[in-house]
Amino acid sequence: MAAMVLDGRALAREMRDDLSLRVAAYVAQHYHTPTLGVIHVYGDRSAERYVRSLQISCNRVGMNFKYYLLHHTATQRELESAIYTFSADPNVDGIIIQMPLPIKYDSAAAVGQLDHRKDIDGVHPINVGLLNQNKPSLVPNTPAGGMLILERYGIELAGRDAVVIGRSAIVGGPMSTMLLNAEATVEICHRATRNLADKVRRADVVVTAAGKIGLVTGDMLKPGATVIDFGINVRPDNTICGDVDYASAFEVAGAITPVPGGTGPVTTMVLLNNVLKAAIATHVDIDDDMAQC
């Protein structure tokens, strides 16, 4: 039996339409346009494409966009100065530091310079701590998007066994925490994990965030499992694919996100929703209902 396709594009369109209305209402009431600030160290073309797509998405929902581009020779001090500039700017509501930073930078020190109230990636230690306490404020956009897809399609998590492949601070780690907070039983796998196929085969929910083509195949899956694929990989022919072999997994899984068209579009909408949420928290004192997804 073929899997149900967890269509992120359809959900993202709904979120975009709703967010556009809420942004317009906010601007009309408070005379302030929510603004996203992006800090990027020049050198990664795929990151540059992503930044351009963010600018387009901001325009579509009525938000402003500010861009701080640093030359690859910029020092740690210059990077932190850029972060401070946006953090101190009352017209910038949400900030992302385009990751990964070149290896010469101390990423943790850079993140620590963020105003945590503007940290729409949810990577500041304060926001990480709140998520770990199940009191989330601003949370990492990619895993939050994955959780929204699961919620949108009615995938039950409480009491289910989940395997998360990947433990990064912005995807695998926080996704594991979110699944735990939803009362799933979670096992985290990584490059040193042994017998990965056996662990995946026992899971009701499989999440991949490893950046490896063909990491999970259909014969590794428990029949009816839900598969959330965060992987973004480029094949030799320049087409995009995830970590999961979609064709074989589609025949075994109960539900699966495609790549492209799965988690990516929803991630962008979560990010922009966090910008509005941060603007509301910073500029006005109103009901929390307006800031909800």
Image: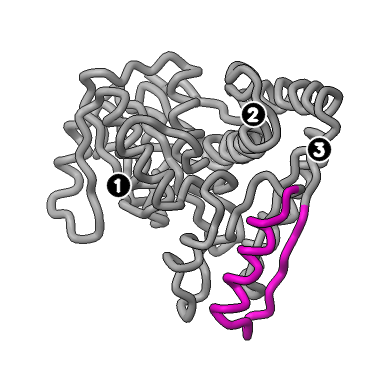
The amino acid type, in three-letter code, at marker 1 is Ile
For residue 20, side relative to residue 198 (left or right): right
247 up-or-down from 44: above or below: above
Graded by Cα atoms within 10 Å as few (under 14), some (14 to 19) or many (20 or more), the crowding at tag 3 reads many
Circle 1 residue: 165
Which residue: 43% across, 44% down?
127
Residue 20 place in picture, x, y as percent: 77, 26
Residue 42 place in picture, x, y as percent: 66, 73
234 up-or-down from 82: above or below: above
For residue 205, side relative to residue 143 (left or right): left
Which residue: 14% across, 41% down?
198
For marks 2 and 1 on the same chain, the one whose residue lies earlier in the sequence: 2
Kind of element beneath mark 3 = loop
Which residue: 78% across, 21% down?
21
For marks 3 and 2 on the same chain, the one whose residue lies earlier in the sequence: 2
Q: Is residue 73 magenta?
A: yes
Kind of element beneath mark 1 = strand
For residue 49, side relative to residue 194 (left or right): right
The dot on residue 12 is 2
Kind of element beneath mark 2 = helix
Graded by Cα atoms within 10 Å as few (under 14), some (14 to 19) or many (20 or more), the crowding at tag 2 reads many
The amino acid type, in three-letter code, at marker 2 is Ala
User: Nearer the viewer's eye, disc 1 or disc 3?
Assistant: 3
Q: CA distance from mark 1 to mark 3?
A: 39 Å
Q: Is residue 92 magenta?
A: no
135 up-or-down from 117: above or below: above
The dot on residue 33 is 3
The amino acid type, in three-letter code, at marker 3 is Thr
